[in-house]
Amino acid sequence: MGTALALLLLIPTRAAAIPDATRLEHLLTQDCGACHGLYLTGGLGPPLTPEALAGHSRDSLIATVTHGRPARAMPGWAPLLSADDIAWLVDRLLQGIPAP
């Protein structure tokens, strides 16, 4: 009984660490898209297509999203997103987002 209860207490913690894909997809199109273009092909900010990101490591992209680019208009998202959310977003950008 004690082991089962202990396992149940761990479930909400694990679930909270899994990024919410629907929320993050919306963030990509609305928040990232506001500066990087509706299809992330560029706007005020540079394009975020896999081709445009090819010269950057995953870690450097995570650092950019986390801390921003102070000399540019890119804000840091660490106050609003978890490290797991940021990693999910970067991985999604590296996979590419098909145009509707």
Image: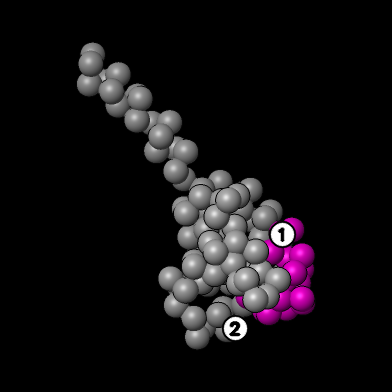
Residue numbers of the magenta segment: 30-48
Residue in the foreground of this view, choosing between 91 and 34: 34
Prevailing secondary structure class for the magenta stretch in the rendered image? loop
Marks 1 and 2, how far apart in space?
A: 19 Å
The residue identified by callout 2 is 52
Q: Mark 1 and mark 2 in contact? Answer it, CB < 8 Å.
A: no
Which residue position is annotated with label 1? 31
Q: Residues within 10 Å of mark 2 (few under 14, many from 20)?
A: few
Provide residue 26's location: percent of width, then percent of height: 68, 54
The amino acid type, in three-letter code, at marker 2 is: Ala
Residue in view at x 49 percent, y 68 percent: 63
Residue 18 colored in magenta in the image:
no
Left or right, 30 with respect to 51, comes to right
Quadrant where the C terminus sits is: bottom right
Position of residue 18 measured from the top left corner of the image (x, y, whole percent): 46, 45
Q: Quadrant of residue 70?
A: bottom right
